[in-house]
Image: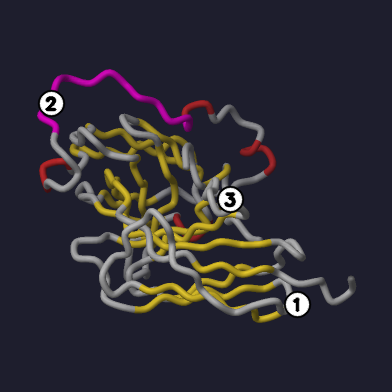
Amino acid sequence: MRGSVRALAAAVLVTAGLTGCASSPSSGHATPPGTRLTATLDSPVDITLRWHGRAPGGAAGRIVEYATAPEGPWTILQYVPLSQTSYRHPDLMPKTPFHYRVRPYYGPASRAVDVRLPKGRFSAAEQKKDHRWAAPVARPQPRVPTGPVTAASAAPGGLRATVKEANGIRFTWTDHASDERGQLLEDRPRGSRSFRPVAVLDPDITSFGLVTLPEEKHAAYRVRAFRYGPASNVARLTTGQTPDG
């Protein structure tokens, strides 16, 4: 999954009878010990995923993915914390096979920076401004030691936040990972107890601008270099006809 998971000023969320309620094992993927995924049709076009078992050691979180063909391509629905054990996928295409899996992701995070934005909403006038400063950029950087994401030394370094406008922040950092699959920008809005991914970036990116949501006026931010772990079993279901169909 490349690019940002958030469009300007909006979180990008991917959303999608009864012909089955079973899970099938994956082929070609190792299953993390203790991880088991099942899928249930709540209605002809609504599916709930549930997984249980011990969280993989050292994992930072999981991703939930789906495909409409056994071989993919796979689309990420959401990055979820390790404490989350279910996901609802509603309003799906009728009479369509859906394949699901979950995967852990690993990697060290930078030190967090605290950002407090000035007052002001993301008005129509603000939306018309030039936001090219927000584009992800792989900026030249001095030669620095790098290592695999399994090493703590691979955490991004020197994270800095520059307030660009009342609802915009540009982040810069130094990339220390040699084999990351990508980088996550994570935030923890004031009053929240945990960090959450708000943007997924390509490897080697060292500058990115975020147009914030209202609840992010005061938040902590960090960057994480990451790689994916092995997939769970694949849960397969076929949707039915819509009630009005």
Between 190 and 143, the one lying in front of the other is 143
Residue at image x 19%, y 65%? 57
The kind of residue tagged 3 is Ala
Of badges 2 and 3, the one in the foreground is 2
Residue occupied by mark 3? 10
The residue lying at 31 percent from left, 29 percent from top is 204
Q: Residue at x 46, y 61 (%)?
A: 64
Quarter where residue 154 is shown: top left
Q: Nearer the viewer, mark 3 or mark 1?
A: 1
Q: Is residue 203 left or right of residue 110?
A: right
Find out whether residue 137 is within the magenta segment: yes
Q: Position of residue 227 (x, y in %)?
A: 29, 46
Residue 206 visible in this rendered orientation of the protein: no
Mark 2 residue type: Val
Q: Which residues are magenta?
A: 134-146
The total number of labels drawn is: 3
Residue 82 place in picture, x, y as percent: 32, 69
Toward the front, the furthest residue is 27
Can you give x and y, in whole percent of width and height, for residue 138 in the image? 35, 24
Local crowd at mark 1 within 10 Å, few (<14), some, or many (≥20)? some
- Seen in the image, is 91 located left or right of residue 147? right
Q: Which structural element holds mark 3? A: strand
Q: Nearer the viewer, residue 136 or 189?
A: 136
Q: CA distance from mark 2 to mark 3?
A: 34 Å
Observer-side mark, 2 or 1, equals 1
Res. 243 mark: none
For the residue pair 161 and 157, the one nearer the viewer reads as: 157
